Amino acid sequence: MVEPVGTDVTIYEVGPRDGLQNEKGLVPVEAKAEFISRLLGAGLPIVEATSFVHPTWVPQLADAAELMNLLGEDGRHLPVLVPNERGLDRALELGLEHIAIFGSATETFAQRNLNRSLDEQFAMFEPTVVRAREAGMDVRAYVSMCWGDPWESAVPVDQVVSVGKRLYDLGASQLSLGDTIGVGTAGAVGTLLDAFNEAGLADDVLAVHFHDTYGQALANAYAAYQHGVRTFDASAGGLGGCPYAESATGNLATEDLVWMFRGLGVETGVDLGQLVETSLWMAEVLGKPSVSRVVQALG
Ligand code: HMG
Ligand code: MG
């Protein structure tokens, strides 16, 4: 796990990956590299750069290798999404050090996002993680649809915990709990975190990944913070979504999260002014305004 020094919480920035995977237009690779450099320059300790998935499944990120080559040494320590051994080979060829696998807590999303059944996904991830660890890589695991699924509605807590723990136990250093379609609410956040704690996964190995479809992402992040979680996924300007999850909108905006933590006196290490500038610049690249209320207020 990448451990930033001197901050109270870790913001795991997913804008270049979760944000840009969902954009209709293709963003030039040079603009992606600049986006990442600016985010790092604003003090974000971890920036998930891109995905080594099948290029026809996510054409927006088909330039993953080109991007990582452009970033050079600066990109080597940045995490990238990898679903399988083919993706791992591509990451290894570039000398990358951190990968993230991404499993589903539900059958339908496993089929739609990974072309695998719930059980089959583990057969895909297991050798990927084993080989990554043998190569000295750090592995993060995501579990999606933790608080609801568009096809299966409510997802039983036991099922989420069972899938999440299995993914973590493959050899991950951290498990990120994804509210892929943004339906979770603060009470349910506490319930799921309690259940993971009872299953042996303490808050310090958990991260939370909230999408903001119902405007609950910031409240959910606060609930997770109060519970004891210290790693928060967020996306600059509130970019994001999942092309394979109906009704997934943007992630929790990094600016909104930083603003909240600033008010709480919680050190994030992020320069809010520089971050807002970056999101305003990216909004111009994308040709649409940022959805972040803090970007709108300060911009
Ligand atoms: P598949 O079609 O079942 O793949 O897709 P396959 O294993 O049958 O292989 C078919 C062909 O694809 C083979 O080529 C492979 O080499 C090639 P052929 O032999 O026919 O010439 N191939 C690849 N090529 C390049 N890179 C690869 C790769 N893998 C296979 N990695 C697969 C299975 C998993 C690849 C596909 O379903 C896929 O790419 N899915 C990714 C979908 C995705 O990226 N979704 C968005 C990210 S998840 C998310 O956003 C949620 C998250 O934010 C958390 C949350 O919000 O909850 C993380
Ligand atoms: Mg996501």
Image (cartoon, rainbow, N blue to C red):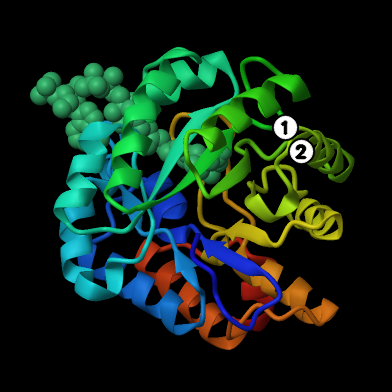
Tell which residue pokes out farthest to the right in this image.
Answer: 187
Tell me the SS state at disc 1: loop
State left or right for residue 64 relative to residue 276.
left
Q: Nearer the viewer, residue 289 or 174?
A: 174
Tell me which corner region of the image, top left, top right, bottom left or bottom right, holds residue 22: top left
As drawn, 163 above or below 102: above
Tell me the SS state at disc 2: loop
Q: Is residue 63 visible?
A: no
Q: Assess disc 2: are there few (<14), some (14-19) or many (≥20) residues with their C-alpha within 10 Å of its C-alpha.
A: many
Q: Are marks 2 and 1 in contact (CB under 8 Å)?
A: yes
Q: Nearer the viewer, residue 222 or 248?
A: 222
Q: Position of residue 236 (x, y in %)?
A: 53, 66
**Residue under pointer 2:** 184
Q: Residue at x 35, y 77 (%)?
A: 37
Q: Residue at x 47, y 40 (%)?
A: 171
Residue kind at label 1, given as amino acid type = Trp
Q: Nearer the viewer, residue 268 or 99?
A: 99
State left or right for residue 69 relative to residue 256.
left
Label at residue 270: none
Q: CA distance from mark 2 to mark 1?
A: 5 Å
